[in-house]
Image: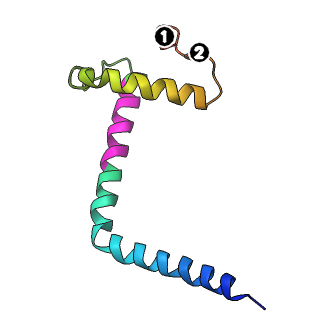
Amino acid sequence: MKSAWEKFKTFSKKANELSTQFYYAPYRAAIARAKREEDDLFMLLVFAEMMGMPNPASWYTLELQPILLERFHEWHTRMGMERSPLDHFRCC
């Protein structure tokens, strides 16, 4: 038999899932559309890079470089790489 604490934990988990679904229900379509747009942009940039075309968004994203530099360093250290995997891009 489940103890009162285990029953409470189960109830609270289900209540949390239900309230989360209730809260996000009106925004599901907008979230899905934003994810599709993000995926489309990623595909455009990857295929353009693969075909040797310059990145069309590079000029507009230049001001984000300091923020991305910090995130890049966090990413490569989290992936277990001591140094940057890119030869021409040093962050450490």
Q: Secondary structure at mark 1?
A: loop
Instruction: Estimate the x, y position of residue 46 in percent, counting from the top left.
Output: 41, 30
Horizontal placement of 47 versus 30: left or right? right
Q: Residue furthest left?
A: 60
Q: Is residue 43 magenta?
A: yes
27 over 80 or under it: above or below:
below
Q: Which residues are magenta?
A: 37-48
Dominant secondary-structure state across the stretch colored magenta: helix
Q: Mark 1 near mark 2, Cβ–Cβ under 8 Å?
A: yes
Residue neighbourhood size for the residue with mark 2, other residues' Cα within 10 Å, grouped as few (<14), some (14–19), many (≥20) = some
The kind of residue tagged 2 is Arg
Q: Residue furthest bottom?
A: 1
- Seen at 42% across and 25% down, the residue is 70
69 over 1 or under it: above or below:
above
Whole-angstrom CA distance, mark 1 to mark 2, is: 8 Å
Pointer 1 or 2: first along the chain? 2
Instruction: Estimate the x, y position of residue 11 in percent, counting from the top left.
Output: 57, 84
Residue 90 is labelled as: 1
The kind of residue tagged 1 is Arg
- Seen at 47% across and 7% down, the residue is 88
Q: Is residue 78 magenta?
A: no
Q: Nearer the viewer, residue 37 or 64?
A: 64
Horizontal placement of 23 versus 91: left or right? left
Q: Which residue is mark 2?
A: 83
48 over 32 or under it: above or below:
above
Residue 51 is labelled as: none
- Seen at 59% across and 32% down, the residue is 78
